[in-house]
Amino acid sequence: MIQLWSSRLASYLVATAFVFTLALCLSRAIAASSIPAGWTCTGSCGSSGTDGVVPLSPAGNPAYEWISTNRGIFGVGALTGVSGDAGRGSSTNGSTLKTITFSAATGSLLNFEFNYTTTDGAFVGDYAWAELFNSANAPVALLATARTTPGGNTIPGANMPVPAATLTPSMVAIRPGLTMWSPLGSSSGACFNGVTFGCGTTGWVNSSFTIGTAGSYFLLFGVTNWNDELFDSGLAIDAVTVDGKPIIASTPEPASLLLLGIGAVPMLLKRRRS
């Protein structure tokens, strides 16, 4: 009797360990491959851990979101009112990523981290941006800009509206030649016209904005190619929070998956014995 009980206990512990490992692996795989639940991608988006020249953000999360012009859609990703150098050129293909709608009080603090990486350069000014909208789809504030430029700062973006948010650091020059990042597809590692013409990565920058009026809002991130669909650019995004709370829909935690799995263990064992 004791031997039978010990055998069943051992089987239960083995099955429980298996379910725990499976739940942990699934949660990590989901975090590293998909955008947050409830967010909407138009074009090319995803989630990744440390990849090439883009490490994890200072927030310490195990993955970040990204959008890229690689496999982007023509007519997507442009910001209204943006022009090129001396008024030349136009946006071509790109991507956007929209958060869920969230509630904020007057004085709520909106924060996120972003990192711009581009293989383009010279005067082919790819760019990325982030903007806050209210629930009526009206723009409230531009929160971040970044743009390819052959000289000077990449953040804030050249020939772009000035962001209303506080950026830390406030101005960022490109780190030239650092373009190895898989969301850029076949452009990863490339540099249009050489490393001195604007290609590279910015590193992580924090955007912080105080919401002035209570209401419902969403964030929209965008990236676009300029004048061509070659030499792609992308934006990494992380730690999007309002008053310190992540802007995501409710999803099952690994612990919930574990409890669900443990509940199924007795049925699995019963089925095995029969």
Image (cartoon, helix red, strand yellow):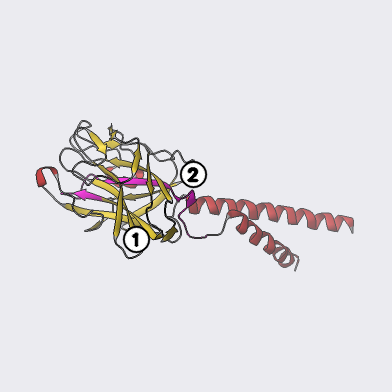
Query: Horizontally, is 112 left or right of 60 in the view?
Result: left
Q: Which mark is residue 102?
A: none
Residue 154 in which image quadrant: top left
- What label sits on residue 134 in the rendered view? 1
Residue 228: in magenta span: yes
Give the image location of residue 48, x and y in percent. Answer: 43, 47
Q: Position of residue 82 (x, y in %)?
A: 18, 50
Q: 200 above or below 41?
A: above
Looking at the figure, which quarter contains the N terminus?
bottom right
Image height of 198 relative to 251, above or below:
above
Q: Position of residue 165 (x, y in %)?
A: 33, 45
Residue at 59% across, 54% down: 254
Kindly state the secondary structure of the residue where label 2 is placed. loop
Q: Which residue occupies the foreground of this view, 75 or 44?
A: 75
Closer to the camera in the image, 192 or 121: 121
- Per the rendered image, the range of residues in magenta is 224-250
- Three-letter code for the amino acid on which mark 2 is drawn: Asn
Residue 68 left/right relative to 8:
left
**Front one among 225 and 194:** 225
Q: Where is the C terminus found, in terms of image quarters?
A: bottom right
Q: Which amino acid does label 1 sit on?
A: Asn
Q: How many marks?
A: 2
Q: Real-space Cα distance between discs 1 and 2? A: 27 Å
Secondary structure at numbered mark 1: strand
Residue drawn at x 34%, y 47% as measured from the top left: 183
Residue 200 part of the magenta-drawn span: no
The residue at 52%/60% (across/down) is 250
Q: Position of residue 202 (x, y in %)?
A: 32, 36
Q: Which mark is residue 61?
A: 2
Going by the image, does 112 lie left or right of 174? Answer: right
**Residue farthest right in this picture:** 1
Query: Which of the two marks, 1 or 2, is nearer to us in this view?
Result: 1
